[in-house]
Image (tube, rainbow, N blue to C red):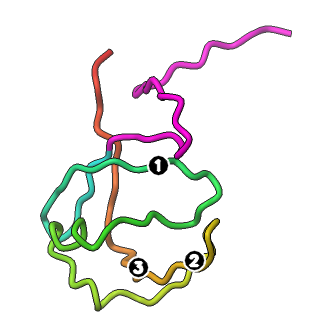
Amino acid sequence: MASKIIEFEVVFNYADQEEGIEIPLVLNANGRSTMTVGFVDTGCGACLFSNEIGMDLGIDIESGELAIFQVRSGRLCSRIWPSCCARVPRRRL
């Protein structure tokens, strides 16, 4: 069987953290951008950020659709906005 080489545009060295894999993010909405960090959760269907991040992006927090998430410690009520966009900033190696 022939082997293949896989190359990636963005490479991160992950710290061994109990909380999970942390990556830098740039979030965009309403013509605004803000930098933050996120934790990778391959089983999650949504990204959750603090109200402060939403306010930095000019999002009316209370206007989002109410959503209830089942998390390890129980249930979490939040609001969702499908128009927001997140990307991983490019870093040179």
User: At 51% across and 40% down in the image, what residue appears?
Assistant: 21
Q: Quadrant of residue 44?
A: bottom right
- Residue 8 located within the stretch drawn in magenta: yes
Q: Is residue 64 above or below residue 23?
A: below
Picture coordinates of residue 57, whole percent (x, y): 17, 68
Which residue is label 2 attached to?
69
Q: Amino acid at mark 3?
A: Ile
Q: Quadrant of residue 83?
A: bottom left
User: At 50% across and 85% down in the image, what residue appears?
Assistant: 67
CB-based contact (under 8 Å), mark 1 and mark 2: no
Q: Is residue 32 above or below residue 17?
A: below
- In the rendering, which numbered label is found on residue 28? none
Q: Amino acid at mark 1?
A: Phe
How far apart marks 1 and 2 lie (CA) works out to 16 Å
**Which of the two marks, 1 or 3, is nearer to us in this view?**
1
How far apart marks 1 and 3 lie (CA) works out to 18 Å
Picture coordinates of residue 2, whole percent (x, y): 79, 8
Picture coordinates of residue 28, whole percent (x, y): 23, 60
CB-based contact (under 8 Å), mark 1 and mark 3: no
Which residue is label 3 attached to?
80
Q: Secondary structure at mark 2?
A: strand
Task: Give the mark nearer the N terminus: 3 vs 2.
Answer: 2
User: At 55% across and 84% down in the image, what residue appears?
Assistant: 68
User: At 52% across and 48% down in the image, what residue appears?
Assistant: 40
Judge left or right: residue 87 versus residue 16. left
Task: Give the mark nearer the N terminus: 1 vs 2.
Answer: 1
Which residue is label 1 attached to?
39
Decide which of 76, 81 is in the foreground and name it: 76
Q: Secondary structure at mark 1?
A: strand
Judge left or right: residue 7 versus residue 26. right
